[in-house]
Amino acid sequence: MPFSSESSPGNRRAYTLLSLLLAGVAGLVNTTGFVALGLHTSHMSGTMATLGESLASGNVALVWLAAQLLLSFVVGAVSASVLLELSQQRPRGRHSSALLLEALTLGGIGAWLSYHPSTHEPTLMWGLAYAMGLQNALVTRVSGAVVRTTHITGILTDIGIQVVRLGSWLREGTRGQGLRGLRRRLWALPTAVEFERTRLHLGLGSAFLGGCTLGPLLFARLGAATLAIPCGVLVMLVALDLSAVATSGPQAMPRA
C-alpha cells in the first residue's frame, strides 16, 4: 500500500512523503496552537514538566490542564491504534480513517477559532493534543517505531546516530583500499541505507522547522484559517492512501 515502508521504490517514496508532510503538519499545528492558545501541544515533555511544577507549587488549575492535555494525547494515540487495527483487512486505505479523523479535528478547531478568535477554551487545547497523539501513533505504526513526527528530540538523536553510522560505513569502505575505496563508497552513497536514513531524519527536522516557521507567519495574516493548510495536506494523504496504487500490506522499516 502507498504508506508502506517496504523496500519497493514506490512504497518507499510514499512512506517518505507521508513522514515529511506530517512532520511539517506537526510543526505548523504546534506553533499555530501556541500563538492562538498559548500552549505547545505536539509534544508532551514540556506538558509533563508543567504538571510536575504545578503539583510542586500547588497550582491546581494548571495541574488539571496539564493532566487533561496528557490524557488527550494518549486518547489520540489509542484512537489511531484502534482505527489501524480495525482496517488491517482492507486492501487499501488502511490509514485513511486516522488521517481523516485528524483533519476533521483540526478543521473543527480552526472553525471554532474563526468565530471566537480570542478564546483560550481548554477544549481546543485538548483537541490539538488529541490530533497530535493520533498522528504520532499513526506514523509510529507505519514506520515500525522508527519515525515519529510530532517532536524533534528523537529526530535530532537519530541524526547524531546516523551521522556516526554513515562515517563508519565510509571508513569501512576505505580500509585497505585508500582513495580508490573512498571513491567507490562515495559513488555508492546515494543508494546506501545509512545515507537514506540520515537524509530522511534531516528531512524530518527540516520539515518540522519549516512548519514551525510557517505557522506563526501565516497565523498573523490568515488567523485560524491557517489550520486549513494541514487539513488540506491530510486530505491529500487520504486520497493517496485510497489511490489505485495501493497493493500489499506494510512491512516495518528496519530499526536504525
Image (cartoon, rainbow, N blue to C red):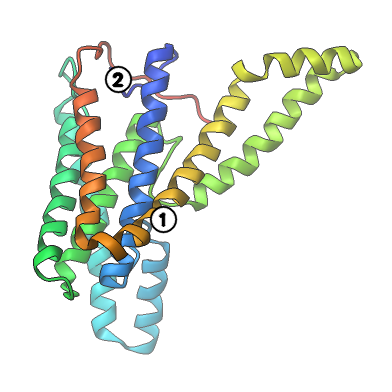
Residue 197 at x, y percent in the picture: 55, 29
Q: Can residue 70 be seen in this view?
A: no
Name the residue: 37% across, 60% down: 217
Quadrant position of the N terminus in the picture = top left
Of 35 and 72, the residue lying toward us: 35
Measured from the top left, where is residue 225 in percent x and y?
19, 56
**Residue type, mark 2 in image:** Pro
What percent of the width, then of the height, locates residue 195? 62, 26
Q: In this view, does 70 lie above or below 3?
A: below
Q: Residue 212 carries which label?
A: 1
Q: Is mark 1 on a helix, strand or loop?
A: helix
Q: How crowded is mark 1: few (under 14 residues within 10 Å), some or many (20 or more)?
A: many
User: Which numbered circle lies on residue 159?
Assistant: none
Helix, strand, or loop for circle 2? loop
Q: In this view, does 149 lie above or below 119?
A: above
The part of the image, by quadrant, that contains residue 85 is top left
Q: Mark 2 points at which residue?
A: 2
Q: Which amino acid does label 1 sit on?
A: Cys
